[in-house]
Image (cartoon, rainbow, N blue to C red):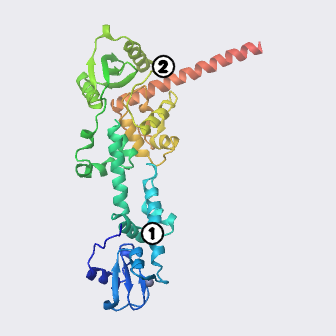
Amino acid sequence: MPNKLTLDDETLWRTWESRDTSMVGRFVIAVASTGVYCRPGCPARMPKRKNVRFFADCDEAEAAGFRACKRCKPRERFEDGSALVEKACEMLAESADERPGLAAVSRQLGVSTGRLQRMFRQTLGVTPGEYAAARRVERLKDGLRNGNDVTGALYDAGYGSSSRLYESAGTTLGMTPAAYRRRGSGMSIRYTIVDSHLGRLLVGATERGVCSVKMGDRDGDLEAILHKEYPAAQIERVNVAELGQLSRWVEALVEHIATGKPSLDLPLDIRVTAFQGRVYQALRAIANGQTRSYGEVAKEIGRPKAVRAVANACADNPVALTVPCHRVIRGNGELGGYGGGVHRKRELLAREARAALRESQGDASRTSARTALTAG
Ligand SMILES: [Zn+2]
């Protein structure tokens, strides 16, 4: 099917006269007196207006009996342009993390950013930025549809921070990300709230494992967070007699809070993004009595630039203690935030440090006892 010229001859002529190259790929100009056709911006001598005809592309010009100009090589520019744009699209759409910016892409392809931008507009009708944004929105919608939470879906879609999306959420999604998601749909959650050494403790679980652990002062606050985390779930508070296997998990958590001892290899049933999953795995590998900075965790999971996303993942951790987000602190040694309150974070870390110290002293005395025995 032949292309169509969408612009009138007058506009095309003005573009041609100004040697504007931003229209390369949109039309060619054929000169009756020479039998040659050129792309916009050709440095050859300017023909007379009355001698020129415009065509949408090389094929049309050649079908009308014109041959390609040897100076501006219109066909090569057409073809190498679309191949280049295709390559650039691939690069811009690549894996969500560390997606190269426009400058990096053009550097790698050996063209100026200006030229790449023009070629994008010619080939696709949009700028590289618009193209990348459209792809991000697509990925975000997919992520939210697949049940991911907003923060994780944003990150996976390639948004560095959520603020940018929220600014334009109304137009790109047609609704807010929070309204878009349906988290916890199909989940049946039973929970209880008990006393612990650090105040009230909410533990929620499905048949498969623990899905929510919160500490706080008031039951109502903890329940509100649970409902916010799993807005589409079926949630039921149960009394002690009805706890079933949940009672063992509650006991383990209460004991951990009291003693600081590591005893929390509980089964989990949480709905998180791949990114959160990696963060939580790294958190569970932090030994009792130790801490890491958000930056260190980001490095550990191979996303050194994702410090803020790591902090967000910690803040969104649905299962306090079992995923020990309290062991992640700021790079400058400050404690940073904690859903259960910073005083609880401080107290947990102190208890765990004491427990770890007792354990290592226990090891040391056992070792010296063995040494004494061997020596004797
Ligand atoms: Zn030419």
Residue 200 visible somewhere in the drawing: no
Query: In percent of the image, x 33 and y 21: which residue is there?
Result: 204
Residue 231: where, in percent of width, then height? 26, 30
Q: Does residue 254 sit above or below 54 in this rendering?
A: above
Q: Quadrant of residue 131?
A: bottom left
Query: In percent of the image, x 26 and y 18: which residue is there?
Result: 236
Residue wearing tag 2: 263
Front-most of residues 29 and 342: 29
* Kind of element beneath mark 2: loop
How far is mark 2 from mark 1, CA to CA?
61 Å
Q: Which mark is residue 147?
A: none
Q: Nearer the viewer, mark 2 or mark 1?
A: 1
Q: Amino acid at mark 1?
A: Gly
Residue wearing tag 1: 81
Q: Considering the image in quadrants, where does the C terminus appear?
A: top right
Front-most of residues 299 and 35: 35
Assign ligand 1 to one image quadrant: bottom left
